[in-house]
Image (tube, rainbow, N blue to C red):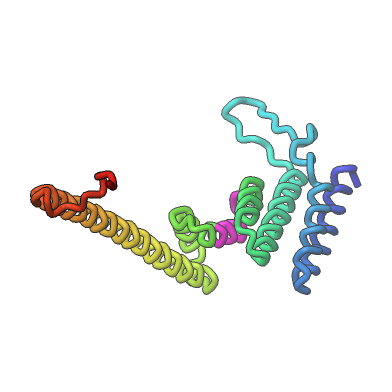
Amino acid sequence: MSENEDKLAAGKREKDNGNECFKKGDVKEALRYYHQALLHLSGLQNNKSFAVFRKEQEEEPKKDPLQEDIMKTTSVVYSNMSACCIKLEKWSKALTYANMAIKNDPENTKALFRRAQAYINEGNTTKAREDLEKLTLKNPDDAAIKREWYNLKMKDREQDEKQRKEFKGMFDRGRKNEENEEMKCENIDSKSTKSTTAHSKPASSEPRFVELDD
């Protein structure tokens, strides 16, 4: 077994250990094993032994089975890390790991599904819809995908309701400000009227506070 094959095997063992922890509900321990798996797999994707050579420009690149295995295993590890973060409701990290999984294997539908879940919970319904549409084309009758469509619908409704409340709050504040301005104007007019009336009274009726005592 070559050094790269040995590292790949070690990465797979750590991945399997992580999977066992995940099944038992120990998500944090699962993440620890997945990180260990990545330490074994890191750098293997860019190893010179996996460089792609072409005999001619138009010729299809050669595929290396070991390289493909490494890429797919790496993708699975990242996808499983995304699943852990979804369990922990760490949506941003779940999204990051799902993207890494898809980068290593664009055909990883589980990673695509988890990315859709993360998008929904982050409130990015546009991106979530794009992912769910891709998944539905491949698995139109999948119950889990249908569930996420429902969750997406609920998130849309929640955002619409939040937006309506924000608009209502802005409208109410605007109306209140207008009423306050009107009241200020009325008070100014009232004071002005009183002042004019007071000055029109005969001088003899005013208190003589400024006069000196005898």
Question: In the image, 180: left or right of 37?
Answer: left
Determine if the magenta segment contains residue 116.
yes
Most foreground residue, 54 or 147: 147
> Against 166, is 213 above or below?
above
Residue at 77% x, 46% y: name it: 66
Q: Main secondary structure of the magenta part?
A: helix
State the image coordinates of residue 106 (x, y, percent, origin top left): 59, 49
State the image coordinates of residue 102 (x, y, percent, origin top left): 61, 50
Image quarter of residue 159: bottom left
Residue at 61% x, 49% y: name it: 99
Most foreground residue, 8 or 173: 173
User: Is residue 185 visible in the rendered structure shown here?
Assistant: no
Residue at 53% x, 62% y: name it: 121
> Against 131, is 25 above or below?
below
Question: In the image, 76: left or right of 18?
Answer: left
State the image coordinates of residue 36 (x, y, percent, origin top left): 83, 53
> Against 56, is 76 above or below?
below
State the image coordinates of residue 80 (x, y, percent, origin top left): 70, 60
Give the residues drawn in magenta, as a range: 106-118
